[in-house]
Each structure stands twice: as structure tokens, then as C-alpha cells.
Amino acid sequence: MNRVYYFEMPVDDFDRAIKFYENIFGWKITKEERPSGPYYSVKTGESDKPGINGSFFKREEGWSTISNVINVNDIDTVIEKIKGLGGEIVFPKIVINGVGYLAYFKDTEGNTFGMMQSDPDAIANNGL
């Protein structure tokens, strides 16, 4: 079974968002260096309790809401199933070096989700 395991939240002001979530909920937020720009890992709690962690990234046009990311075993097969059942791929599969493969889709109800196939050996040809 494929589970939601991560969220991604677009923000306009990292400092403001960090202050808000750390002070209200006690989340631990740390900056990571990524070629694509600022990216912050969000730890929402201890691993022995239910819940998911996530990240903050700079809001860009077209990314206005939180996305939940579903862990999948074979992203290419899932992409084909989504297309076959009336869904739409809105952000094609990309490689994240040392992490895996990521794509975003819109379901038949208009909801957008991410999906990630983990692969610590993943390497992009373009050096991302």
C-alpha cells in the first residue's frame, strides 16, 4: 500500500513561517542547500508518534497550496495508471540526486499530490 508520508508547504517569507510554526507547534525547522533554491526540512514530532514531517519551499506561481507526497514503489507505473484513470500529470518526473524520483499529479477531483519513489542511488544527468 502506498502511504502519504510527507508534506510540502509553499511560503512567501521563510523567517515568518519558521517563527510561526516553531512557536505555535514546536516544530524543528532546518535549512538545506539545494540547487533549486532555499528549502527547509520540517520535523513535526518524534518518530514514535503518529504523524508526518515535511518541508517549506519558496512559493512560485502555480504552487499555492500544501501538497501531500505519496511514497510509491514504481513511479513510472503509477504515472501510467494515473493517466489511464483520468488523472493528469502536472509536474513531470524529475530526479533528486541521492533521494529518488518526484512527480506531481492532479486526481479526477482536481486535488494535487506529489509522489516519490525513493532511490538513494538516483543521479540526474543534468546535475540537479
Image (spheres, rainbow, N blue to C red):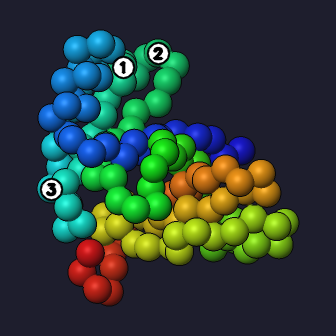
Image-quadrant location for residue 86:
bottom right
Q: Residue at x 30, y 34 (%)?
A: 42
Q: Secondary structure at mark 3?
A: loop
Instruction: Give me the C-alpha separation between circle 3 and circle 2.
Output: 28 Å
Q: Residue at x 15, y 35 (%)?
A: 15
Image-quadrant location for residue 84:
bottom right
Q: Secondary structure at mark 1?
A: loop
Counting residues from the start of the chain, the first of labels 3 and 2 encountered is 3
Counting residues from the start of the chain, the first of labels 3 and 1 encountered is 3
Residue 108: % across, % down:
79, 57
Query: Is the N terminus in the top left, top right, bottom left or bottom right quadrant?
Result: top right
Question: Between tags 2 and 1, which lies in front?
Answer: 1
**Of 7 and 12, the residue lying toward us:** 12
Q: For label 3, count other residues whose C-alpha is less than 10 Å away and answer few (under 14), some (14-19) or many (20+).
A: few
Q: Which residue is mark 1?
A: 45
Instruction: Give me the C-alpha separation between circle 3 and circle 1.
Output: 22 Å
Q: Which residue is mark 3?
A: 33
Q: Are marks 2 and 1 in contact (CB under 8 Å)?
A: yes
Kind of residue at disc 1: Gly
Q: Which residue is mark 2?
A: 49
Query: Is the C terminus in the top left, top right, bottom left or bottom right quadrant?
Result: bottom left
Kind of residue at disc 3: Glu
Q: Are marks 3 and 2 in contact (CB under 8 Å)?
A: no
Q: Secondary structure at mark 2?
A: loop
Kind of residue at disc 2: Lys
Q: List the single residue furthest toward the bottom.
A: 125
Residue 93: % across, % down:
51, 73
